[in-house]
Structures are given as structure tokens and as C-alpha cells.
Amino acid sequence: MTVSGATLRNRVILPPMCQYMVTARDGVPGPWHLAHLGARAAGGFGMVVAEATSVVPEGRISDQDTGLWNDVQRDAWAPIADFVRSQGAVPAVQLAHAGSKAATWPAHPGYPDGGIPLDEGGWETVSPSGIPAVSSVGPTRELTSAEIEDTITAFAAAARRADEAGFDAVQIHGAHGYLIHQFLSPVTNRRTDEWGGSFENRTRFVRRVTEAVRAVWPAEKVLGIRLSGSDWLEDSWGEQDTVTLVRELAGLGLDWVDVSSGGIGDTYQGPQGPAYQVPLAAAVRAGTADIALGSGQGMQENPGHDAGARRLFVSAVGAITDPELAESVLAEGRADAVDIGRAALVHPNWPVEAAESLGDARYRELMAPAYHRGSWGRTSTPVRQQAAAEPVGAGAAG
């Protein structure tokens, strides 16, 4: 399938997952990132998205996050993007600013929760209104209008570096209670100027970021965004808000939207269980189906039938671990692709194993040549230890 100018070999995406492995604390990716992302590319994923990569130092979730605020980082990302591409996957990176949820301890065993104290390497965080997205991060300072403009510029500069590093897709992080989401939600945005209040004002920041990134990002490369489809809170950001925003972003050149949820508030109050966020992706897909996109934008609806019919590419995420469940999401038209995140941390070859368990002989095509002997004599797969099922539709590898 083709999204903008990028061809994905299947509909399985490795979503961005923070690794907290920049031990030099300088935002420069290293061998771990090459090994982590490279293994999933070799494991058959159609697109591999690098973790939340900050556009400014103070936007990092932790002090061990990656960045794209300077050229040293750009040059370190280049061989990683190149290797991911060499293994057949589309290399992508998520551009992020954590806002009030920055300067937290790495989510590794042995570290405490919450913010890093200033005298232990932490820093002052910023936000739309000086309201923390969660109480555990501590106090935060309201951004000035000039600082907001500087942050928009920083997103564009990071996108330019991502292009120079060889990434074929960027995903703007607008979810999970980080800075863009903090502007969207009335829970964390209490501003009374042009950046807060009405829906138009609260969405101004993400629209400006999208415009700035699109202006420097090549037209043939994929421009995406991750959004929280709902805060799952009263009088907050919700499903219809998301649909309305995505429709507006489509007019600014967006190709792809990845629909997650939550991230604001101390207690998650949304649904749980397998594929619990898929209904949000389905709502966005249905709510944008009538938008006529420009030539080369989004994905082609019916390749070989109507070359002019294009629409937004919508991916779903959230507790999708079983191959049959993933296949049903795609076959039923609830999303155009599925993100396999935490399951891929322990199953880097998830797409290969899923295709095999669904009875799709093309799983061998996804295997790295050096690993083909691993298919000899296989009777079951780690992803699902039972008899292979009949393939449904095009299969998760289709």
C-alpha cells in the first residue's frame, strides 16, 4: 500500500516507544536505538517509528530521551534510518515536546516516579497555562506568546533535520498529555488569549505546528500526527473534537493520523481491554471518509481502480496483540493499519509470526534472509501457540 510517496509492505506499524537509553543525556541516539529499531525492521514491520524525539532540550520526557534539535543528533539518526529502510520498512520518527510532563525520571526499573528535582538534573517545565497535566510532575510555567512561536519554529527545524537524516515519515506528537495535547484540552488550557478558550483558539497551536512542518517537509514524504481521541474526562477533549480537528488538519496537508487516547489527569477513566481504542480510530476514519485529498496526499483508496480516490491513512493502537484481532480490525475497515507496540518489545518479529499463524505463506517474504532457517520445521508460533487459522481478507501481512 502507498501513503503519500511511501510504500508500506504491510499494514503493521511499530509505534514510537520511549527507550530512555541516551545515557550521555545529550539527545543523541546510539547503538541501542539502531539495534531496537533495526530488529523490528528486520522483523517485518511495514513502518518503524522512532520514539518521541524532542524538538528542544526542555521538551524531553526524561533526560535520557532522543532529540532532533541539533545537527549532531541528525547525523546520528541517519545510519539508523538507512538501516531500517534497508530491511524493507519505512523509517519514521515522532517529533515531540512533553510540556509539563517533561523532566521526569526514565521509566526503567530502579527509578522513582514523577519529576526529576532541579538539583538532580531536572529543569523548569512549560505548559499552556501553568497547569500540570498530572499532579506527579510538579509545578510548571505558562509559556509566553513569543515562546509559543519559538516552539512552532523548533518543530519545523526538527522536521527539516528528520528529512536530512533520511526519514520518510514524521509523526507530530499531539497525544498522551504532552504539550500539543495540553493546548487542545480545556482541562490544561485556561488561556484567555489567541491560544486558548474556544475550540479554534485551543487548536491554533497544533494547526500552526502542522503548517510549519508541512512547509519544510517534502510533499512526497508522509506527514502524520498522533492524537488522543478522548481524555475520557468530563468537559474535556473528546471524539467529535478529534474528528473536527483531523478534518481541518487534512486541509493543511496531513496524510496520516494515529489515534490513541488519554494522558491528562491522574486517573485513567476510559475503557480497557483488547483493542480498547479502536472505536476512536474507526470514528476518525468514518468522520473523514468524505474528504477529497489532493494528488499524492494520504492513501489511495482503491489502487488499480480509481487512481484519483485518496483519503487519510488512519492507524489504530491499544492492546492489539493477537494476530486474529489485528486482522479483524483491518478486514472490518475500522482502521487502515494497526500499531503493535508493547507486544513487539518481546516479539520483534511479530509481523512474521502473525502472518504465519494466520496461514499466510507470505510470512517467508517478511523474514530477513539471514533468518530463513528459523522457519524450518516450525509447527507453532510464539505469538499464538495454537493451530494456524485460515487467513482473513488480505491478511495482516497484506
Image (cartoon, rainbow, N blue to C red):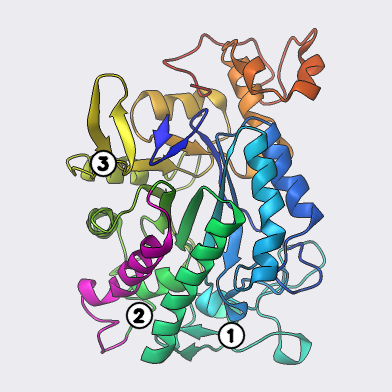
- Magenta-colored span: 191-219
Specify the quadrant that holds the N terminus.
top left
- Structural distance between the alpha carbons of marks 3 and 2: 36 Å
- Tell me where residue 240 sits by quadrant: bottom left
Relative to 210, say whether 2 is above or below.
Answer: above
Whether residue 196 sits left or right of residue 104 in the image: it is: left
Residue 17: percent from left, percent from top: 62, 53
Three-letter code, disc 1: Gly
Residue depicted at x 68% and y 38%: 40
Residue 194 among magenta residues:
yes
Which of label 1 and label 3 is nearer to you?
A: 3
Which residue occupies 39% across, 78% down? 188
Towards the viewer: 96 or 2: 2
- Say few, some or many: other residues with alpha carbon within 10 Å of mark 2 (under 14 / 14 to 19 / 20 or more): many
Label 1: which residue?
Answer: 138
Q: Quadrant of residue 246?
A: bottom left
Crowding at dot 1, Cα within 10 Å, few <14 / some 14-19 / many 20+, comes out as some
**Mark on residue 295?**
3
- Quick check: 378 above or below 164? above
* Three-letter residue code for mark 2: Asn
Residue under the image location 52 percent in, 8 percent down? 390
